[in-house]
């Protein structure tokens, strides 16, 4: 770490070493492991990584457009548990419990085979160099862009975890039954503001949700358009256990195009999940939703800011973690 080497160089001077120590403590307090991430991390070691990832993601989305949303969701569910360390990608074994079977993920998160394909493509270009955590971050950006959303320079330099947290997956990821206060709290626990939360929720402008996750909202909630509720009920039986995996688009209008229609749906009380509609329900975030309807560019800008901040959540850098050979298992 730069602060440590600075402290060593200044050891001959008490005042200088004291200043270096103070700087180190300030940096540690600020949680600056993310400061070691850089958009140029692979500029010499693997300049071809971006083309390799983009090509594989384009192929996956051409095969199934929904996959773009699934990859973005993988990144979100990974970063909210132990930071953006690819812990979500680890398979369970007889001696290792991963995160895939946790309630928010079991039967829900998908796209692991796409990440495998991307990793394989990247390994052919530069073996043993690029982490699965970085591949997921780049793939999430590319998915958004391919579906019509904004682009940004992805900070890289993350390393892969050798651990996972089943309990973290169960406790940190906001459930679809969340109210505004719970959503705000769970994002705040990751260093993300309420503004970030509303912007990042806009990822629901793409993708599908399972009946089990919106059943209560379309049958029991009153802050929902009646015709919309009946339409969704037609594909989602009231009885739990019946049709649980039936799908409906999170954005009723354009579920494979990344734009601001998600927010327009909320104002019309056509949010698919309870947690979606909470963003426009007479509360503190109503004005932000309205601002994204008025200006898609404002939404895009805030979404990019949120994605970069989310990508900065406690990454493993330097000599911490490892560069997995296979994203599903520890080396």
Image (cartoon, helix red, strand yellow):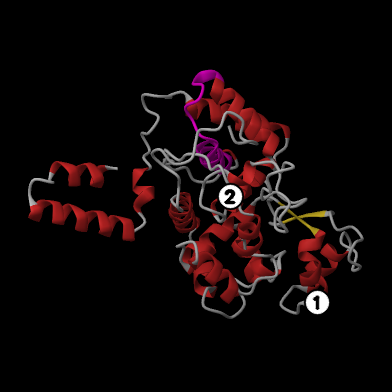
Nearer to the camera, 18 or 43: 18
Q: Is residue 131 visible?
A: yes
Q: Does the magenta stretch include residue 126?
A: yes
Name the mark nearer the viewer: 1 or 2. Answer: 2
| Mark carried by residue 320 | none
* Residues packed near mark 2 inside 10 Å, few (<14), some (14 to 19) or many (20 plus): many
Instruction: Return the x and y of residue 186 as percentages of the image width and height.
Output: 55, 67
- Residue position for label 2: 78
Quadrant location of the N terminus?
top left
**What is the C-alpha distance between the residues marked 1 and 2?**
31 Å
| Mark carried by residue 220 | 1
Q: Looking at the image, how many numbered discs can be counted on the residues?
A: 2
Residue sitting at x 65%, y 28%: 117
Does 277 sit above or below residue 78? Answer: below
Q: Is residue 257 visible?
A: no
Please provide the residue range marked out in magenta: 124-145
């Amino acid at each position: 770490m730069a602060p440590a080497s600075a402290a060593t160089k200044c050891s001959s001077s008490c005042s200088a070493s004291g200043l270096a120590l103070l700087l180190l403590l300030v940096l540690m307090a600020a949680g600056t492991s993310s400061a070691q991430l850089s958009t140029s991390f692979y500029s010499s070691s693997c300049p071809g990584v971006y083309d390799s990832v983009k090509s594989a993601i384009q192929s996956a989305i051409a095969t199934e457009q929904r996959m773009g949303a699934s990859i973005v969701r993988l990144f979100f569910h990974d970063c909210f548990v132990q930071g953006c360390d690819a812990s979500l990608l680890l398979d369970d074994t007889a001696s290792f419990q991963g995160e895939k079977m946790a309630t928010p993920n079991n039967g829900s998160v998908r796209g692991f085979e796409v990440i495998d394909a991307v990793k394989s493509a990247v390994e052919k270009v530069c073996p043993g160099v690029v982490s699965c955590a970085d591949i997921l971050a780049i793939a999430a950006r590319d998915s958004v862009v391919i579906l019509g959303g904004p682009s940004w320079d992805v900070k890289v330099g993350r390393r892969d975890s050798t651990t996972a947290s089943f309990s973290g997956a169960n406790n940190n990821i906001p459930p679809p039954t969340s109210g505004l206060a719970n959503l705000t709290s769970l994002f705040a626990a990751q260093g993300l503001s309420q503004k970030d939360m509303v912007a990042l929720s806009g990822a629901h402008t793409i993708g599908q949700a399972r009946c089990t996750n919106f059943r209560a909202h379309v049958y029991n909630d009153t802050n929902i358009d009646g015709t919309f509720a009946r339409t969704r009920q037609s594909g989602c039986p009231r009885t739990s256990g019946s049709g649980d995996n039936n799908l409906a688009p999170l954005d009723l209008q354009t579920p494979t195009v990344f734009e601001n229609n998600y927010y327009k749906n909320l104002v019309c009380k056509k949010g698919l999940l309870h947690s979606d509609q909470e963003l426009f329900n007479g509360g503190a975030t109503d004005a932000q939703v309205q601002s994204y309807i008025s200006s898609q560019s404002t939404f895009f800008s805030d979404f990019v800011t949120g994605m970069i901040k989310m990508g900065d959540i406690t990454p493993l850098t330097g000599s911490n973690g490892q560069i997995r050979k296979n994203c599903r298992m520890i080396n």
